[in-house]
Image (spheres, grey):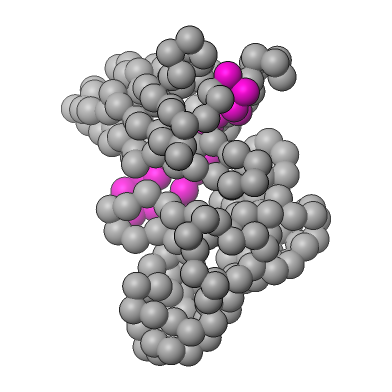
């Protein structure tokens, strides 16, 4: 099973600044990685799939990168609606697994 | 547009059973590999299991915590995915989501249905 480790657990950033979230895999794979945003009481919202492809309707300030064991989600200029919990997920082979989440909070 | 709508959640006693459904539209359901994911209150996301399309064998895979207790099935004539949950434990309390991957679009999720296991 691939273990996905996200860092940091909590990230405090001011609106307008850049946020960089990391996701490390215990085994290498190419691009079968997704990023989600989740707000309280809501289902996860897909942001990125294929490691770097933005999902439909996702603003350009969200970008994904990486391959192998290191992946990154970057939010270029934080808006108020971006403060939430973010999860990475691999879907390279079963069992698929999620990271434990990074909470992005207002500094 | 792909839509996934879960139903069937509710309150059940420990040791009891419950069957969840996920009605799908906007996709060729018979070709889709479908999955269940759950989220316990205040916790992260956890895969429950997945089922392949019949063309790809129709078999299901399960996460270790539910193997032997949960069964995933599908009715392609009704565009519906099922999760039969037996021998429920308090730790199975969670919101259960169905989800599927569509090439070129990514992962689609339903809004979830809450299962509470409590006496």
Rendering quarter of residue B59: top right
Q: Residue at x 36, y 23 (%)?
A: B20
Rendering quarter of residue B54: top right
Front-most of residues A40 and B43: A40
Question: B96 above or below A50?
Answer: above
A65 displayed left or right of A47: right
Question: B97 above or below A101?
Answer: above
Q: Which residues are magenta?
A: B30-47
Counting the numbered discs, the total is: 0
Residue B45, magenta (yes or no): yes
Rendering quarter of residue B116: top left
Which image quarter holds the N terminus of chain A? top right
Q: Residue at x 79, y 53 (%)?
A: A29
Residue B111, magenta (yes or no): no
Q: Is residue B110 visible?
A: yes
The picture places residue B8, in percent across and down from the top left corner, at 28, 23
The picture places residue B80, in percent across and down from the top left corner, at 43, 19
The picture places residue A20, in percent across and down from the top left corner, at 57, 79
Q: Residue at x 59, y 47 (%)?
A: B106
Front-most of residues B115 and B81: B81
Front-most of residues B31 and B99: B31
């Amino acid at each position: 099973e691939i273990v996905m480790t996200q860092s940091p657990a909590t990230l405090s950033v001011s609106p307008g600044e850049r946020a960089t979230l990391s996701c490390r895999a215990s085994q290498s794979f190419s691009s079968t990685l997704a990023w989600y945003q989740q707000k309280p009481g809501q289902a996860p919202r897909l942001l990125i799939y294929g490691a770097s492809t933005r999902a439909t309707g996702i603003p350009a300030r969200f970008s994904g990168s990486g391959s192998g064991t290191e992946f990154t989600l970057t939010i270029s200029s934080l808006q108020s609606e971006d403060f939430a919990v973010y999860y990475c997920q691999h879907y390279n082979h079963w069992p698929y697994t999620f990271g434990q989440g990074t909470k992005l909070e207002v500094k | 547009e792909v839509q996934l709508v879960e139903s069937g959640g509710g309150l059940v006693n420990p040791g009891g059973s419950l069957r969840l459904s996920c009605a799908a539209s906007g996709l060729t359901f018979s070709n889709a590999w479908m999955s269940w994911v759950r989220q316990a209150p205040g916790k992260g996301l956890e895969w429950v299991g997945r089922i392949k399309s019949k063309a790809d064998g129709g078999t299901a895979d399960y996460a270790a915590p539910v193997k032997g207790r949960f069964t995933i099935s599908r009715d392609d004539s009704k565009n519906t995915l099922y999760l039969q949950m037996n021998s429920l434990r308090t730790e199975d309390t969670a919101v259960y989501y169905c989800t599927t991957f569509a090439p070129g679009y990514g992962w689609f999720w339903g809004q979830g249905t809450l299962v509470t296991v409590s006496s």
